[in-house]
Image (cartoon, grey):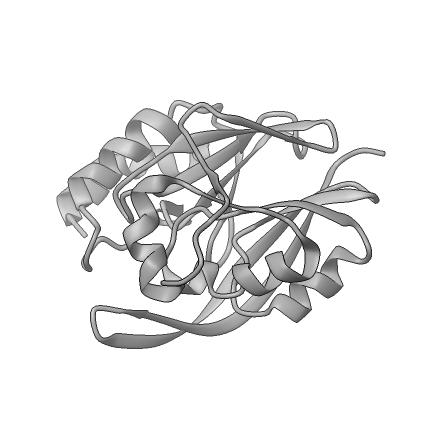
């Protein structure tokens, strides 16, 4: 059975620095008919569990620890027994949402997580958050796939105007870790529509000039 990507959109709120915003999040499920991992357990543990459709959940992987990407992680972990994986640099953000429950596993740059015969390589891409990571799977999809969380979107980098974020850092992360991937690589984001590395690469200089 070949690995596939299932996509779920869940809705809730993002809260940081005293503000709250309504958001729609992309939840990505990678696996085959028997096992899977969830990338970003956002908002709806019941909906994500239903989308697993009886498959064994091996891991809940957090691209970063803003509350809208992790709020359903403990409930999904409790229901499935799957460990939560997070880069340790994002623990301060995680603790804002889940002060009494720590992730089970630490993500590290270069680490490889394998599910259904497909390797997901962890790329540490700080900037949107200190422990932000992307997951690169060159053998997933027609041209390879990278799950970018809130680091890279269609049209530019993730937001850096709030606590724990930094614009020059996210630009360096994108330049050094993402734009070096093959141009045809599909970019699957934390919110909104996807893109490709090749579609975003020519715009780096204008992002820097905009400085957002």
Residue 157: tell me if it is visible.
no
Between 189 and 35, the residue placed more toward the observer is 35
Q: In the image, residue 15 lies at what x, y percent?
A: 32, 71
Residue at x 21% of width, y 50% of height: 165
Q: In which quarter of the image is residue 163?
A: bottom left
From the viewer's perspective, tell me whether residue 77 is left or right of residue 203: right
Q: In the image, residue 210 lies at what x, y percent?
A: 16, 49
From the viewer's perspective, tell me whether residue 2 is left or right of residue 182: right
Between 22 and 100, the residue placed more toward the observer is 100
Residue 5: tell me if it is visible.
yes
From the viewer's perspective, tell me whether residue 118 is left or right of residue 35: left
Q: In the image, residue 186 lies at what x, y percent?
A: 54, 37
Residue at x 64% of width, y 55% of height: 7
Between 194 and 121, the residue placed more toward the observer is 121
Q: Quadrant of the N terminus?
A: top right
Between 143 and 120, the residue placed more toward the observer is 120
Q: In the image, residue 79 lies at what x, y percent?
A: 68, 62
Q: Note whether 67 is above or below 185 in the view shown.
A: below
Residue at x 27% of width, y 55% of height: 159
Q: Note whether 35 is above or below 48 in the view shown.
A: above
């Amino acid at each position: 059975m070949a690995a596939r990507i299932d996509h779920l959109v869940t809705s809730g709120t993002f809260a940081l620095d005293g503000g709250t915003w309504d958001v729609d999040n992309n939840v990505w499920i990678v696996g085959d008919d028997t096992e899977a991992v969830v990338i970003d357990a956002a908002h709806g543990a019941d909906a994500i569990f239903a989308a697993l459709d009886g498959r064994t959940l091996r891991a809940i992987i957090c691209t970063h620890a803003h509350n809208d990407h992790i709020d359903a992680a403990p409930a999904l972990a409790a229901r499935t027994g799957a460990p939560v994986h997070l880069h340790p640099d994002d623990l301060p953000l995680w603790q804002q949402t889940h002060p009494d429950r720590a992730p089970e596993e630490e993500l590290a740059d270069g680490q490889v997580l394998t599910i259904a015969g497909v390797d997901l390589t962890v790329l540490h891409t700080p900037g949107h958050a200190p422990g932000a990571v992307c997951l690169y799977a060159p053998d997933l999809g027609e041209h390879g796939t990278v799950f970018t969380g809130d680091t890279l979107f269609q049209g530019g980098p993730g937001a850096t105007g709030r606590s724990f974020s930094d614009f020059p850092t996210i630009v360096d992360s994108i330049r050094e870790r993402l734009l070096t991937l093959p141009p045809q690589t599909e970019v699957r984001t934390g919110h909104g529509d996807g893109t490709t590395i090749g579609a975003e690469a020519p715009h780096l200089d204008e992002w820097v000039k905009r400085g957002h």
